[in-house]
């Protein structure tokens, strides 16, 4: 494996920082600190940082398109880095997982997620390893768009910080030991 790419889905701009939909950005920020890689170069419709993890080349990306155009960044990154989907791990929020839950999968569909829908459409593949971070289901009185663009309640923040950390650890496990090991370690309750 010559290179691995890690892409965290989110919306650019201060007004979206730390919202539910930006769970992917939160994981990339943890990896950036963990691996000492600055994510600030503009490339592939995103902010990019490149570095090494135990000799392996790694790339961190935060798309700078809006969520429903995430496929532009992912498709461009595949092309630019001449990568295969299996070498690109994507982090996203998931309203169908309990708040703070983390799920690692080797591939999968889009579900209700517009970012994933666009990625599958523009790359023609669903074979991306992924880490989904549970942000909790939408309360009945909320509009879905408002819910995913809302911030966490103060009492939920510690569970989310733990989930982002766990997702970053799962990414490192994937990089060093492969997707099966990451699933075995991080899909436990």
Image (cartoon, rainbow, N blue to C red):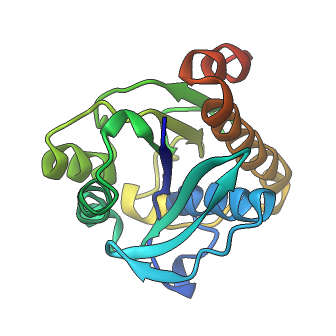
Quadrant position of residue 68: bottom left
Is residue 126 shown left or right of residue 183?
left
Quadrant position of residue 173: top right
Is residue 127 in view from this perspective? Answer: yes
- Asked if 12 appears above or below 80 in the picture, the reply is below
* Viewport quadrant of the C terminus: top right
Of residues 82 and 32, the one nearer the viewer is 82
Total residue callouts: 0
Q: Position of residue 108 (x, y in %)?
A: 33, 27
Is residue 91 in view from this perspective? Answer: no
Is residue 181 shown left or right of residue 15?
right
Q: Position of residue 1 (x, y in %)?
A: 49, 34
Q: Position of residue 107 (x, y in %)?
A: 37, 26
Instruction: Name the residue rendered at 53%, 38% in the picture.
Output: 132
Instruction: Name the residue rendered at 55%, 23% in the picture.
Output: 179
Instruction: Name the residue rendered at 56%, 27% in the picture.
Output: 104
Q: Position of residue 4 (x, y in %)?
A: 50, 45
- Asked if 118 appears above or below 167 in the picture, the reply is below
Of residues 119 and 160, the one nearer the viewer is 119
């Amino acid at each position: 494996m010559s290179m691995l790419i890690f892409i965290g889905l989110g919306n650019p701009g201060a007004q979206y920082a730390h919202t539910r939909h930006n769970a992917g950005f939160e994981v990339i920020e943890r990896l950036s600190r963990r691996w000492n890689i600055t994510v600030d170069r503009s490339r592939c419709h995103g902010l990019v940082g490149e570095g090494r993890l135990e000799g392996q080349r790694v790339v961190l990306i935060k798309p700078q398109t809006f969520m429903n155009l995430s496929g532009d960044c992912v498709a461009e990154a595949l092309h630019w880095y001449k990568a295969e989907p299996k070498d690109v791990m994507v982090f996203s929020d998931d309203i169908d997982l309990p708040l703070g839950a983390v799920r690692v999968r080797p591939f999968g569909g889009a579900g209700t997620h517009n970012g994933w829908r666009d990625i599958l459409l523009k790359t023609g593949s669903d074979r991306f390893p992924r880490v989904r971070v549970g942000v909790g289901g939408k309360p009945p009185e909320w509009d879905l768009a408002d819910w995913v663009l809302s911030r966490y309640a103060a009492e939920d923040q510690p569970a989310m910080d733990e989930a982002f950390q766990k997702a970053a650890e799962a990414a490192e496990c994937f990089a060093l030991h492969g997707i099966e090991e990451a699933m075995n370690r991080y899909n436990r309750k």
